[in-house]
Image (cartoon, rainbow, N blue to C red):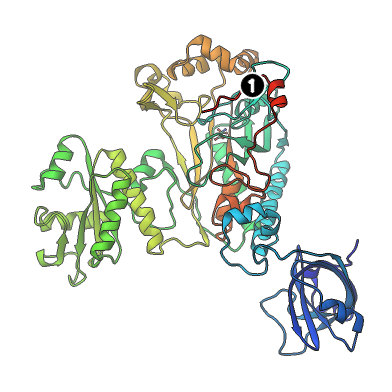
Amino acid sequence: MLKSISCGGLRAEHAGHTVTLAGWVHRRRDHGNLVFVDLRDRDGVVQVVFNPDVAAQAHEAAQRLRPEWVAQVVGKVACRPAGTENPGLPTGQVEVFADQVTVLSESKTPPFYINEDGEVDELLRLKYRYLDLRRPHMRDLLLLRHKVVKFIRDYLDERDFAEIETPILIKSTPEGARDYVVPSRVHAGKFYALPQSPQQLKQLLMVAGFERYFQIARCFRDEDLRLDRQPEFTQLDLEMSFVDRDDILALIEGLYVSLVKVVAPQMRLRMPIPRLTYAEAMGRYGSDKPDLRFGLELADMTQTLRDTQFNVFRNVIAKGGVVKGIAAPGMAEASRRQTDDLISLAKTHGAGGLVTIGLSKSAASLDALAAEHVRSSAGRNLSVAEVHAMARLAGAKPGDLLLLAAGPANTVNNVLGQLRLHLGHQLGLADANELAFAFILDFPLVEWNEEEKKYDAVHHPFTSPRDEDWPLLESDPGAAKAKAYDLACNGFELAGGSIRIHRRDLQERMFKVLGYSPQQAEARFSQLLEAFNYGAPPHGGFAGGIERLVMVLSPGAKSIRDVMAFPKTQAGVDPLFGAPDVVEDKHLKELHIRIIES
Ligand code: ASP
């Protein structure tokens, strides 16, 4: 090794030792007489002192050092004189007096500071990702990711799971996105699809008798890259045989809770982990991945307002719609601009409008609420008694602002769910160092696709309905619930899975509900259907996003890209390699592909 110890590993106990260090020049301060160099390696930074009276040659050489040069230093560790320690640095008790320095490689001036945490344009960061990853907080994120994956492997290994790799070049295995395809050179006109997940493969491993499988699996989904998505990402993919739902939930809970305790002990875990049905989560939080770090629950006002004089609400209710609301704490005196912002947010999520009712904090209590305490955007159309009843339902106090939305239940839940999240963050109700997990259960099995006039699987086509819901598959598929579950945390979906269908006749029945003809089902899924002819065990599993998990464990990560070594931009471009790129005509010809200019 070109070093005897890491820069970041030096402590007071090493005082007196002669060490050889190697790393990057993080910072250099020339004090004329003394030159100070902060030398950085993967483990951290240590201060090196070059003193002309101790080593004249080394001092001379140190004057040439520039940020990001790679250098090897031989020197003696000493405790810093009292009063000059740096408590902000793990190596802050010591410094190294250099005897020799060797430049191992020089560096151009980097396009951005490595030694400062300033905002840097992300395109530039991705183009110079190898420099971006030198920044200590980025290094920490990737090392945390390593710890997460290592913990998962050890935890599952101890519980008799076998890690088994599955192919990347395969045939379509749908998770509701578009496939990436790879042309075959040998088989003209044919394509492989990259797996959206190893779903069918892990089920085949259950048929093969492995009983407990997992994989840290790369998944590929050609989605519109809106929001925080990446074309390829990593999942903990897992499958078990001879289990029911609660066995899998217990495994997930054990795994995630122990992982947090070991890998991110600074995070506060909310226990016990609640279990909500999908309907409950949507009704109370307007989301199937609710952020449970704060309350602000949606309150249903429909019954209270059935006979209201306020026509807008009465008409919505008469047509089968709902009126629901939330109470924004302390926002009764919100400015016009603030309420306009809330209204426009509601509208972007499909609301026709939003009724806002400020409850003046001059009311001594909710019971003392009178007309002069109410400032309503619906004027006097809602009576004080109605406002009072709604405030009670929403848990509002004088000083709060009631926000009411009316319309079809799905729209209203969604709108208020978005407002709830917005307010939670704006009012600082969510603690960044807290983790609030929740299991979401009893998802609908299918949902109606209005565009294509057919049912789509909510999870995927291999998910089993609840036993009692099989008869609904023909009579009312939309009412059937699935044996599917998600693990939500802080407003994200961290993992999802289901108990699968393991009988050929039932899987065929399910394909039929999803609009596949027997020929289509055979063409796409014959591998699974055929396997089910040979004794398939009851099985189920889940998959959890690794990037999301690392993100919730490290509130410093701003996007999913921050926890991937070499991510693509939001437009799906890799600025470092310049992918995607054109390929030579000769290559296209071999692949039997002609480009259509558009
Ligand atoms: N394959 C599913 C997914 O990627 C998870 C599962 O059902 O195991 O979402």
Kindly state the secondary structure of the residue where label 1 is placed: loop
For the point 75% across and 64% down, the residue is 108
Q: Is residue 354 above or below residue 331?
A: above
Whole-percent x and y of residue 54?
Answer: 90, 86
The residue lying toward the viewer, choosing from 137 and 337, is 337
Q: Choose between 172 and 313: the one closer to the eye.
A: 172
* Relative side of 318 to 104, left or right: left
Q: Nearer the viewer, residue 145 or 542?
A: 145
Q: Is residue 66 above or below residue 301?
A: below
Disc 1 target residue:
593
* Residue 98 in sight: no
Residue 430: % across, % down: 44, 60
Type of amino acid at the residue the image marks with label 1: Ile
Q: Residue at x 68, y 45 (%)?
A: 577
How far across and how far down the image is residue 509, in percent? 47, 15
Tell me: 537 left or right of 64. Answer: left
